[in-house]
Amino acid sequence: MFCRFYNVPGYLVDFTTIIFFLSYILFFYPVSFLIEKHKLKLTILVATGLTLVGNLLKLLASTSDRIWVVLVAQFLIGIGQVQICSLPSKLATTWFGAEEVSTACAIAVLGMQLGSALGCVQSPFIVRSEEVDEVGQQLFNMFLYQAIITGCIFGVVAIFFRSSPSLPPSQSQLNLLAMASSNGTTATFFTHMKNVAKNANFWYIVLSLGLANGVWNSFGVLLNSIYLNYFPNGKTDAGIIALITIISGGCIGSMFFGIILDRTHQFKKVSFGILAMSAFTFIFVGISLLEKSRIGTYITIPIFGFFIAPVLIVGFEYLVEVTYPIPEACSSSTFNAAYYFLSIIATLLFEGLFEAIDYLWTFVVILFILAACAGLILLVNSNLRRRDANLHLNQNVPSPEPEPEMSYYTGTRVTTAKF
């Protein structure tokens, strides 16, 4: 429908999503620096402000000759989302204690996924007409709803959000604050980014959890075209399935595995489990599509999403553990940039394979990639440095001189720590 309304090829409509990935790859480095240099509130205000401006700009794109306005608006929103997507781990460790941090990160990711879920149902339920004039008006209405929602979010952040608690919530956060106060932001930031790039565990996680998330992102981009290939009149079904899948995976699955990580700290086992189950459940996704079972797709795709969507939260938290005491924004933003790059590659690859070798063999390629990701995660070292710092077991975390006494909040009392 969007192709017909704007009179453009399908790849250009897909590019409205891919442009988010490009924004992250282009801007993750300066955004990471700004997150470390400035307070959280300023960072989130800039992010929500750019999102609001982009959505307001879309109000001018409800005529058929303005696809370029949509692309510019998406680019602005994408820059804002670079900051938003880098913040879950940073927010969690800034505000929550050692036994709550993975759950808190999962809740932050859940919020982003809920936004994606709402986006999935907007198009098929708001833009329903086939007439050009009516489509333009319905697009305007959809863009207006988006602008109103993002405007409200901007106002809530401006009025109510605080950058940090009065006391650090954990020993690991206390260590980071002490090191930040004793070192220059600019010099240490570039050192941190170099150390992230040199960390072998980082690359193992990127090429396993990051690649799996790239496959998941590309599946989301291509779901509509995949579904319509088997169910030509299934546009509404595709939107509903996408919504259910985001809720089952991005919301329920992320929360479930976030709690599991907080309770067990078994990052490698959880990572291997969700990757292996993602590969296993994808077999049934392929079968339900090939057999053209509409009911089957309503069951198998959300179950697949339940296991593969949480790779994002698990990847965030696993990276923070193995790269500590490097600040969360450095590892998270670099991870995001890497998997967005992989998302672009996967999307273009799968689109090409669908035409070259058909859908069945492309599904086999996807299954092989997911299985390889499950095997690769086993190479990650299980040294959980942030957990050890919180348990006072890590003797390798550098301490600033002189040794100051600082207080942090444990959840039940204020503790004075010397380090």
Image: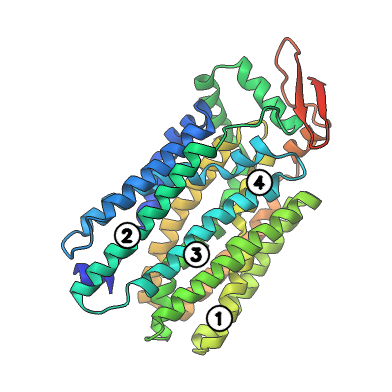
The amino acid at mark 2 is Phe
Q: Spatial distance from mark 2 to mark 4, Cα to Cα?
A: 34 Å
Which residue is identified by label 2? Answer: 143
Residue 59: x and y, percent? 26, 56
Q: CA distance from mark 1 to mark 2?
A: 28 Å
Compute the Cα span from label 3 to label 4. 23 Å
Applied colour scheme? rainbow
Circle 4: residue type: Glu
From this view, report whether residue 110 is shown above or below residue 233.
above
Which residue does the image show at 67% across and 34% down from the upper left?
324
Say what amino acid the circle numbered 3 marks: Ala
221 or 357, which is in the foreground? 221
* Residue 218 in view, yes or no: no
CA gap, disc 1 to disc 4? 30 Å
Would you say 154 lies left or right of 131 here? right
**Disc 4: which residue:** 317
Q: Are marks 2 and 4 in contact (CB under 8 Å)?
A: no
- Residue 337, position as x, y percentages in the image: 47, 46
Earlier residue among tags 1 and 4: 1
Tell which circle, 1 or 2, labels the residue nearer the N-terminal end.
Answer: 2
